[in-house]
Image (cartoon, helix red, strand yellow):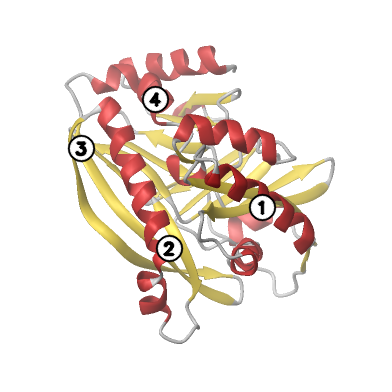
């Protein structure tokens, strides 16, 4: 469905209190929404404790190779972002790239084997295994969990290093402030419940520490009748765009030389009462039998070319 049809379909399902799955592409030009009891048999999901598939033992022999973009190409794009920051057009921009990968695994294998809190396999087109929640609405409380800041867990004093890094602090503060503003569009009484807490996630042979915060607000009565409009107001997610959001999205469109598609969009479930969703990062796409992994990170005025490039590469993994 296109944007307008998709938003109205989500509104309609919410008004009927019908449990459904929804998927929104990054630019919301493509939206999918379908009741759970009618869900196509080529869609599999995991969202917290909710899933519609059986587990499968991982095969012992699997391969994974990546063709990372040249550092010089990455540096040219980062320099363009920094120019925009110096001009005052953006303060934080999430710069992403696609990397060609090779594996003897099919997309569905990657989905089944991946160890992740939130996973989606969508019609043979892509799979994501995301560590990042987007929004949850339980009762009249909406919560969002912006994630900004990544470091290898094996690094000496990794937790102290990531939490004390001025660049990482500035980046995280900007995203939390952006999400506070976004929640304020659809809800009241916005507050930060937790600020910069650490999650540890598996990243192939590595372990990563990721920094998140929790922001909450109170939804108005009748929010279930306008779920589509709520999601429309809140997307794209601030953690994968930047701030100020509208201008930063325009700059992303100018600098990134590929189509994000569903990467950095959102997917989720409304169970008839509550809503749960995730940002579609850690993402592998199948295009004509070739696999592409999309990854990125936040750029600020203090960003270092080499450390940002390393973060981009570190995020290209299969979490087995």
Q: Name the quadrant of the N terminus.
A: top right
Q: Name the image quarter holding residue 209.
A: bottom left
Element under disc 4: helix
Q: Which residue is mark 4?
A: 233
Task: Between label 4 and label 2, give the one nearer the viewer.
Answer: 2
For the C terminus, the quadrant is: bottom right
Q: Which residue is mark 1?
A: 79
Q: Residues within 10 Å of mark 2 (few under 14, many from 20)?
A: many
Nearest the viewer among 68 and 163 is 163
C-alpha distance separating marks 4 and 2 = 27 Å
Q: Earlier in the sequence, mark 4 or mark 2?
A: 2
The residues tagged by marks 1 and 3 sit, at their Cα atoms, a distance apart of 37 Å
Please say if 98 is above or below 212: above
Between the residue at mark 1 and the residue at mark 4, the CA separation in whole angstroms equals: 31 Å
Q: CA distance from mark 3 to mark 4?
A: 15 Å
Marks 1, 4: nearer the viewer: 1
**Element under label 3?**
strand
Whether residue 231 is visible to the viewer of this picture, yes or no, is yes
Residues at marks 2 and 1, CA–CA distance in whole angstroms? 18 Å
């Amino acid at each position: 469905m296109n944007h307008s049809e998709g938003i109205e379909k989500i509104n309609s399902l919410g008004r009927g209190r019908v449990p459904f799955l929804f998927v929104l592409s990054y630019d919301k030009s493509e939206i999918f929404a379908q009741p759970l009891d009618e869900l196509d048999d080529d869609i599999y999901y995991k969202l917290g404790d909710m899933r519609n598939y059986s587990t499968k033992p991982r095969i012992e022999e699997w391969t994974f190779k990546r063709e990372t973009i040249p550092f010089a190409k990455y540096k040219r794009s980062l320099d363009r972002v920094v120019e925009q920051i110096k001009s005052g057009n953006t303060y934080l921009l999430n710069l992403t790239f696609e990397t060609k990968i090779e594996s003897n695994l099919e997309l569905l294998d990657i989905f089944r084997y991946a160890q992740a809190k939130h996973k989606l396999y969508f019609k043979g087109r892509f799979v994501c295994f995301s560590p990042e929640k987007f929004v949850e609405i339980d009762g009249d409380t909406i919560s969002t969990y912006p994630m900004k800041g990544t470091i290898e867990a094996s690094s000496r004093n990794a937790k102290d290093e990531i939490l004390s890094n001025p660049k990482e602090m500035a980046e995280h503060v900007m995203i939390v402030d952006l999400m506070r503003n976004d929640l304020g569009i659809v809800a009241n009484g916005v507050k930060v419940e937790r600020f910069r807490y650490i999650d540890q996630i598996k990243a192939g042979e590595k372990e990563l520490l990721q920094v998140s915060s929790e922001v909450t607000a109170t939804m108005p009565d009748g929010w279930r009748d306008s779920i589509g409009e709520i999601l429309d107001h809140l997307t794209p997610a601030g953690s994968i765009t930047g701030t100020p959001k509208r201008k930063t999205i325009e700059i992303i469109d100018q600098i990134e030389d590929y189509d994000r598609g569903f990467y950095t969009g959102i997917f989720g479930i409304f169970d008839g009462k509550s809503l749960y969703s995730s940002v579609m990062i850690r993402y592998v796409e199948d295009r004509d039998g070739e696999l592409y992994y999309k990854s990125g990170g936040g750029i600020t005025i203090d960003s270092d070319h080499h450390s940002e490039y390393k973060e981009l590469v570190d995020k290209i993994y299969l979490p087995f």
